[in-house]
Amino acid sequence: MDFNLMFGRALRAARLDVTLYNEVEADASLNREALYVVIIVSVLSGIGSFLSLLFSGSIIGALLSLIVGIAFGILAYYLFCYVAHWVGTSMFKGQGDVGEVLRTVGYASGVRAIGLLAFIPCIGWLIGLAGLVWWIAASVVALREALDIDTGNAIVTAVIGGVIVVAIYAAIAAVMAILGFGVASLGGLLN
C-alpha cells in the first residue's frame, strides 16, 4: 500500500473532489485503504480527546476517551455506512452497493483528522465543530456519488444515518454509565 497515494486521496476527498469519490466508488481494490483512513483518523481524534482530558487532569478519563474514541470511530463508520446504504437504496432508490458506500464514506472520514486539535484550549471545541460540519459535507458528497442520488436525498440519508448512530452511541453510553455506577455502588458496599 502506498501511503502517499492514500493521503493524496484523503486530501482530495477533504476538498470535496467529486472525481475522487467516483474513482473510489468504482475501485473495489480500495476497500482496505478506505478502512485504513477511518482507523488513522479515529486514532488521531482519540489522541486529541486524550490530550484534552489529560491536560484537564483526568488520566483515567483520558485513557478511556482514547480507547472508546478509537473503537467508536470505527464502529460508527460501519454503522453509518450500512444505515445510509439502507436508507439511500430503500427510500430514494439509490443504486450503489455497500462496498461503494464504505469506500466513499471512508475517504470522506479523512477530514475527521482535525479532531487531533481538540486539545487546544478555548478553541478546540470550535475546531471539532468545524470538523463535524466538514465531515457532514464530505459524507453528503460521498453518499450522493456512491448511491447515485441527488444532493437533497443524500442530505436526508446522511441525517438519518447520523441520528441513528448518535442514538446507538447514547444508548451504549447510558448502559456503560449504569454499569459504572453499579460497579461503584458495589465497591462502596464491600468497603
Image (spheres, helix red, strand yellow):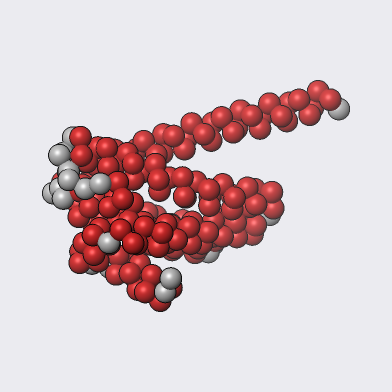
**Residue closest to the far front:** 29
Taking the spot 29% from the left edge, 69% from the top edge, the residue there is: 12
Q: Nearer the viewer, residue 187 or 75?
A: 75
Q: Nearer the viewer, residue 155 or 32?
A: 32
Seen from the viewer's position, the closer of residues 129 and 83 is 83
State whether residue 143 appears in this view. yes
Image quadrant where residue 108 sits: bottom left
Q: Which residue sits at x=78%, y=29%?
A: 187
- In the rendered structure, the answer to whether residue 109 lies left or right of residue 66 reads left
Q: Is residue 45 visible?
A: no
Residue 141 higher or lower than 181, as above or below: below
Q: Is residue 119 above or below residue 68?
A: below
Relative image position of residue 141 (x, y in whole percent): 23, 56
Instruction: Give the farthest residue toward the right.
Output: 191
Residue 142: % across, % down? 26, 55
Q: With respect to residue 91, does 78 lie above or below?
A: below
- Report the quarter where the N terminus lies: bottom left
Write the residue at 36% across / 36% down: 164
Q: In the displayed structure, does residue 144 sit left or right of residue 49?
A: left
Q: Which part of the image, by quadrant, shows the C terminus?
A: top right
Which residue is the extreme one toward the top? 189
In this picture, residue 67 sits left or right of residue 14: right
Q: Quadrant of residue 163?
A: top left
Position of residue 59 relative to residue 120, above or below, is above
Residue 81 in the figure: left or right of residue 128: left
> Residue 44, percent across and down?
51, 62
Q: Which residue is found at the position 54% from the left and 56% from the top?
A: 46
Percent across and percent down for residue 24 are: 27, 62
Q: Nearer the viewer, residue 69 or 98?
A: 98
